[in-house]
Image (cartoon, coloured by chain):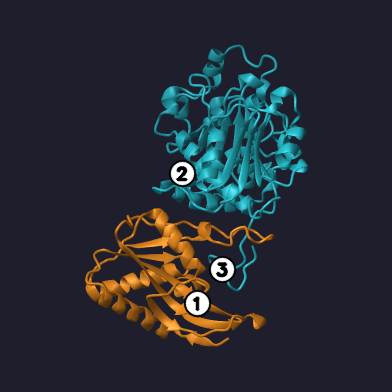
Chain colours: A cyan, B orange
Amino acid sequence: MPPTADVPTPDGLGAPVGLRTKDLLSIGDLSPEEIYLILDTAEAMKEVGTRSIKKVPALRGRTVVNLFFEASTRTRTSFEVAQKRLSADTINIAASGSSVVKGETLADTVRNLEAMAPDVIVVRHQSAGAGHLVARLCRARVINAGDGMHEHPTQALLDALTIRERKGTIKGLKVSIIGDLLHSRVLRSNVLLLRALGADVSVCGPATMMLPDMARLGVRATTSIDEAVEGADVVMLLRIQLERMRGYFFPSLREYFQLFGMTAERLKRAKPDAIIMHPGPMNRGVEIASDVADGPCSVILEQVANGVAVRMAVLYLLADEPQG
Amino acid sequence: MPVVMAADQVARSITRIAHEVVERHRTLDNLALIGIRTRGVPIARRLAAGLHDIVGTTVPTGVLDITLYRDDLMRHAVGPQPVLRKTDIDFSIDDRRILLVDDVLYTGRTIRAALDALIDFGRPGAIELAVLVDRGHRELPIKADYVGKNVPTSLSESVQVRLAEVDGLDEVVIQDASDS
C-alpha cells in the first residue's frame, strides 16, 4: 500500500517495507531483513493475545483455507487461532474427511478450492514440494505448514522468535540440533534461518540419520551428543519420526535414548543459561527426559505461544491484497 | 517549506493544553493518556510531564498502534503492508477518562481507528482528543477537544510534525506535494 497524502505511513519514517514473496514456501524465500520484519511484526502481534478481546479486524472478510493432509494438532490449531484473532474466515479441510479419500488428486482439490476464491491457503502434505504445486495452481497466497521431509518455515520462525526473546539476538549463538535429522523438515527450515541470521549451528544424530549436505549449509555434524551440547546456548531436540521411517535406523528406542536422549546430566555441558527447545509432539523418554522437558531451561510451551504470533504476522504480511 | 510552528511554539502549545486539561477536569485521578504511534506518543509523554508539573499527579500513559484497525488495509492493489508496532497499555481503561493524543488531525480516519481499538480494550468512561495540529479536511464527524494550533491547508499540502524524540528537533512544517 503506497503512502498517499491522506494515508501517512504509520511511523512516518518512510515507505513501508514488506515481503517480496507471494507465498511462504521455504525459509530460502526470505532475506534476513524479511525474517526480521516477520519477527518484529510477531512481537507486536503478541500483545493482541494479552487483551480481554483477543481479536483485531485486520483480515476481516478474507478467506483462509487450512488444507491438512497430515495429522496435526499444534500447527493446525495455531494457524486457526491466528486467523481468528485477525478476523479472517477460516475453513478447515482435513484429508480424512475430504474427497481425497474418494481418490481426488491434490491438483484437483486445489483447483476446486481456487474456484471458491480463497485469499490464503495453508497447506500441510506428506510430500515435499506440495506447497509449491499448490502455489503454481492458484492465485491465493500459499503458506507451507510442512511438506514431507522438506520444510516447515513457520516453525523455524517461531523458534527464532523464542530464541531472540530469551537471548536478545541470534547472531553468534551456538545452537545444537539433536535427533532425527534425516526426516526433519523442522531441521531444514531452522538451519536455513539460523545460518541466514549468523548463528553457529551444529547437528547431532545417529550416523544412519545424517544428512549429506550439512557441510554445504555451513553446519557442523557429530554423532557425539556430549560434543554437540558442549557450550551450547540453545539445545533443540527433534522428534524421532517413526511414521516416516522406511527401514531400520537404530536398534531400539531405549538404545536411542541411551545414546542421544537429552538428560539433565548431559545438559550440564551446555551454558548455564542454555534453553531447551522441541517442536513437538514430544516423545518423552526417547529424545528428551521428562525432567528436562518440564525443567527450568525448557521453553517448549513458549514456542507454542509464539507460534500463534508468528502465524498472525505471516498472514498479515502476506495478505496485502484481495484475491479473486 | 514554511515552518508553521517552531520549537518554542510547540512547547508552549503542549503546556497550554496541559493547563486546559487541568481546567476541564475536577480531578486527574481517573485520567489516562494514550498516544497514537508514532508521534502521538512523545506528545502524550510531554503532556503527562506537563500535568505533573501543574498538579503533581502522575497520569498513566499508554501507547496505541492503530495499524490493524486501518480502514485502508488491503484496499490498495499494490505495495506492502504498513509496519506494525507494539501497542502498550498496561492499565485498565474501564471507566477511565481517556485522553487520546495525536500529532495531526486531518481526515479523522486515524482517530476512528483508534476509537475502535480502544473499545476493544474495554469500556472507557469517556474519550477526549488532543492534537498538536488541526489541518482541517475532515471526512468523518470527529472533532478535537484540545488543539495546539489550527493550520489551514490545501489538499495538495502535507503537514510534517517533527519531534525531538523521533526526528531530533521540534518543528511543524507545511510541504507542498509538488515540491516534495
The residue nearer to you, when weighing A173 against B82, is B82
Residue A63: image location, x then y, percent: 62, 45
On the same chain, marks 2 and 1? The answer is no
Q: Residue at coordinates 37% horizontally, 78% vertically from top-left?
A: B14
What is the quadrant of the N terminus of chain B in the image?
A: bottom right
Location of mark 2 (residue) = A166
Q: Residue at coordinates 57% horizontally, 51% vertically from top-left?
A: A59
The amino acid type found where label 2 is placed reads Arg
Q: Is residue A89 above or below residue A204?
A: below
Q: Secondary structure at mark 2?
A: helix
The amino acid type found where label 1 is placed reads Val
Residue A272: image location, x then y, percent: 42, 36
The residue nearer to you, when weighing A143 against B166, is A143
Query: To which chain does the residue with label 2 belong?
Result: A
Query: To which chain does the residue with label 1 belong?
Result: B
**Dot label at residue A13:** 3
The residue nearer to you, when weighing B134 against B161, is B134
Residue A232 seen by the camera: no
Location of mark 1 (residue) = B161
> Mark 1 touching mark 3, by CB under 8 A?
no
What is the quadrant of the C terminus of chain B in the image?
A: bottom right
Q: How many other residues sit within 10 Å of disc 1, few (<14), some (14-19) or many (≥20)?
A: many
The answer to which quarter of the image holds residue B42 is bottom left
First in residue order: circle 2 vs circle 3: 3
